[in-house]
Amino acid sequence: MAWTFRPPLWSVFATAAGCGLLLTAGYWQVSRGLQKQALLAQYDAAQQHAPMTLSAASAALARAEPQAAQAQGAYLSEHQVLLDGQVLAGKPGYDVWTPLRLADGALLMVNRGWLPQSGVRSELPALPTPAGLVSISGYWRALPRPAMRLGKGECVQPAAAARPWPRIVDYPTVEDLHCLYGEQVIAGELLLAPDAPGGFARGWRALPAEMPPARHYGYAAQWFAFAATLLGIFIKLNLKRTP
């Protein structure tokens, strides 16, 4: 008796395509897990350093990774913006950006956390804001950027200055913020510390419980197992004993 392996050409291509898709899905899950692990490590590293005091000079070069920071100033509660397209626990909502007037006159954007949508686009959430001089702390980082930017910025939208506040924005650049406020805005955002008063739902340091890095790795193992199973079935169906 001898073994022969002569699979049809179509089954070779189908199996190769299927295994390729399954492996791609597995590698994507691994990359997402590594990204979240790196994010956690960045926040842990930021907590090990003394916070920098933000000013027009010290905050001029915001990095992508978060840095521990603190600031003192007064919130401009009547000129807040809502960052659109933010999801928490599967619910759509906004990140609340409130400008803070620093002692040196600079304008700093403070991300005070997440609020849910009401279900009606025209009904915006209430934005209670601390009054007077406040001292805040958190994480300083560069402005977030989407993977793909659709449409045009705030500066080229007609009658931008006449729109009421608060305004819904879609990942504004520092140029967009300059257009909105009519003055220079420090390029970056301060993520309000999770335990600081005057904010909303914040999970800068904590990742969603339903999708930690370990779960991504678990899903990756499943995709890799599916690929191995498909390859095993292909071999078993086409490997035959002949006299």
Image (cartoon, grey):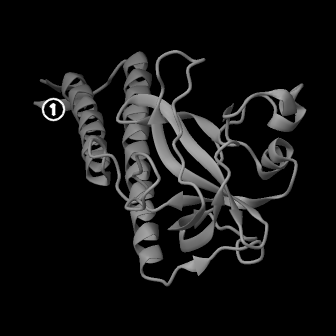
The answer to whether residue 241 is above or below residue 187 is above
Can you see residue 65?
A: no
Q: Which residue is tagged 1? A: 2
Q: Quadrant of residue 79?
A: top right
The spot of residue 176 in percent (x, y) is: 81, 44
The answer to whether residue 73 is above or below residue 230 is below
In this rendering, position of residue 47 left or right of residue 152: left
- Going by the picture, which residue comes out furthest to the front? 132
**Is residue 43 or residue 239 the one in the foreground?**
43
In this rendering, position of residue 152 left or right of residue 224: right
Secondary structure beneath disc 1?
strand
**Is residue 72 or residue 66 the one in the foreground?**
72
**Is residue 77 or residue 236 the one in the foreground?**
77
Decide: few, some or many residues near mark 1? Use Cα within 10 Å; few <14, some 14-19, many ≥20.
Answer: few
Q: Quadrant of residue 19?
A: top left
The answer to whether residue 64 is above or below residue 232 is below
Can you see residue 134?
A: yes
The residue that appears at 47% across and 17% down in the rendered structure is: 119
Quadrant into which the N terminus falls: top left
In this rendering, position of residue 5 left or right of residue 31: left
The residue that appears at 73% across and 43% down in the rendered structure is: 172
